[in-house]
Amino acid sequence: METIKQSSSKKIKVGIPRALHYFKYFPFWKKLFDELDVEIVLTNPTNKKIVEEGVTHGFGELCLPVKVYYGHALNLINEHPDIDFLFVPRYVAELKESYFCPKWLSLPDVIKILPNCPKLLNFEVNVKEFPISTAVIELGRQLGKGRSKSLDAYKKAQHYYDEYITFLRKGVSVNYALRLVLRDLPFKMPKKKPQKKVKFLILGHAYNLFDRFVNLDFIKKFEDQDIEVITIENMPKWVFKDPVIVNNKLLNYWRHEEEIMQAVRYFLTKGRNEIDGVIFLISFACGPDSLISELIMHDLKTVKIPYLAIIIDEHSGDAGLLTRIQSFTDMIKRKIEREEKLKLEKNINIKTKV
Amino acid sequence: MLCSFPNMGHNWPIFKTLLECVDCEVILPDPTNREAIKIGVKYSPEFVCFPFKAVLGDFKNALDKGADTLVMAIDCGPCRFGFYASVHERLLKEMGYDNFRLIPLDQADLLTFKWVKLLKKVGPTNQLTFAQKAIKAVQFFLKKAKHVEDIQTAEGVFRAYERNQGDTTRVVIKLIKQLDETNTLQGLREFRKVIKDTFNNIDVDKTHNPLRVGLSGEIHISLEPYVNLDLRRKLGEMGVLINQSLSVYDWVVHKFHLNYHRKWLEHLAHPHVPMDIGGECVWVLGEYIDTAQAGFSGFIHSYPFTCMPEVTARTIITNSLQKKYDLPVLYFSFDEQSGQEGFRTRLEAFVDLMTGRRNKKSEDQNLSKEKIDSTLYQHYGNNFYNECLNLIHKK
């Protein structure tokens, strides 16, 4: 691939769609590109126009996040014709013995055939075959940077990303942390909110949970109901240490699903009393989740933790979603109240007996 | 011990041989039917891919018939197939079947020889005779698989020319039965000739000039006639010549890293998808390009609804390859809701379209239809495919 000679005044511009991997790896990319003297052009947060464009381009059976990704990519191509590269990474395997969803593996291949698509930056994370640093050197080469500079950038980016992850583990919402990253602010804890009575675990892929347009501001709806919400990003590191054994025949090779299962395992065993309910947000036609949600549902049923699966697609209506959430939370609140009442009565009974 | 395995079209004799050669009794589930699918749909997760549901139905049927050991292929690729065996086991246990075991047949890479474990588990306890029996099992398995592939190839060719509709179907059923009963090495060696002779007896209309269509897609959907609404037969009875290189033999040889046809397809698809992303995505793309270059009239891609790799293949074919190679393509995504009539209408329309295109081409270039067909790439397809074509033209 030919390299671009960089003039001292003008920085190379790289377009990044604000969808899919963005919600998971953006801090890493941001630091990496900053170190490589590259200007990042981000698309706007998802809006109606982007979704519509994506849905028109992608055909029916694709899942919503990929359609939204199409929308963002098209948006970048049409509205920023001055970008030199489009950054569509290929994430194959982050750990050995693991994979990402097939649609992630082939993402650059389906994006590069869009009309008028600028050159894609080749960045392949495939730990099965070569370490990430090799991929970063390759990335630097395409941007006209030397080996040592790329490696240096990689080291700094990885350090920054680790910091970001530890910051999330303290219980900060991803959207808040991403805002800090975007504005180049240091990681500072937000004001502590008062502890709430009911606590839910929200499962799902980052690109579903934190894209506030796609999921119709899902998390805010819970906060409005006076409910504390945690996501798997907020859980301590040791939870994700051991692989989940579903069955001795099964090697769970999907990275994200593995994380979800590990989080659920924690609440099935040690943290059983820490949460009052589990909600799984699934996008329609998501392959991995269709099987995983089934496994999780059966497990949660056996330990009697309430579980709600919500499936979204581009036709999801706000009112319907709100009704489901409200009925679920009302049910759980009532359950908690009843349990407290029973406890009180028991105490009174004991006292009267004494 | 009574062993069983799920249905996949005409491929039951090969798996049966594999298990019977190591002294294992085999019980076959009923051919996939409405009841089995219904049960599969009832107990499976809602939007899992269709083969999962069909296989679950087959397993239940087999267990009801008295089987106590189920054999299921597993994989650890990026697509959903790797989860099948373990989730099936779990669902069957929840349905109330406790007394069975599900033995995985590891086929991620056959050169690691993990599949020997399967044979050991179901095979004889006497280790002395095991090696001999296992070798025989593998030998018979490969030979029978090759013959099933040959029958499939010949079926695709001869049905397009047959005079009495239904002859080929009858011959295929007869041959599969005969193959199942042939259990000597000598018999298997001569079986290729048997296939040729039997097909040669079909009354064919040599003057017919069929359209040629390439078939590909997800393996279970492509091979199981109940699930794909008997696509091959319906297409053949409209007088269309079919070539489908996809078969169990093709897959197994690929897993032994010896399938040069697939390597060629990978080479063709490399600029579009540079790696195996699960399913048959890479090979479908390769097959599309290959059939387009060979001068075929059309291509049919069938896959289960929401299958992740195949959906990617479809996206790439519609958005890029179709413009480049200009080969008409028809997609069928199958699930439990597939209806016969709509399916038939689409097929008929597709065949009409291909006929129209060919007529227009012959008008434009002032060539006869025979001439256009003679411009086809001559060395397309495997040996047996070309032998079948020769058989017909010699008549």
Image: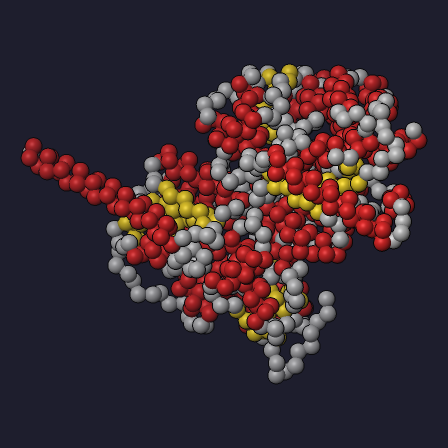
**Residue A159, how many percent across, how many down?**
51, 64
* Residue shown at the point (65%, 81%) measured from the top left: A7
**Residue B1, how many percent across, how many down?**
59, 16
Picture quadrant where residue B332 is located? top right
**Residue B292, how many percent across, how many down?**
78, 49
* Residue shown at the point (66%, 60%) measured from the top left: A113
Query: Most extreme residue toward the bottom, as rendered?
Result: A9
Q: How many marks?
A: 0
Picture quadrant where residue B354 is located? top right
Q: In which quadrant is the C terminus of chain B drawn?
A: top right
Q: Is residue B223 left or right of residue B268?
A: left
A117, B85: nearer the viewer: A117
Q: Is residue A192 left or right of residue A24?
A: left
B50, A107: nearer the viewer: B50
Residue A287 appearing in the image: yes
Residue A22 to residue B259: above or below:
below
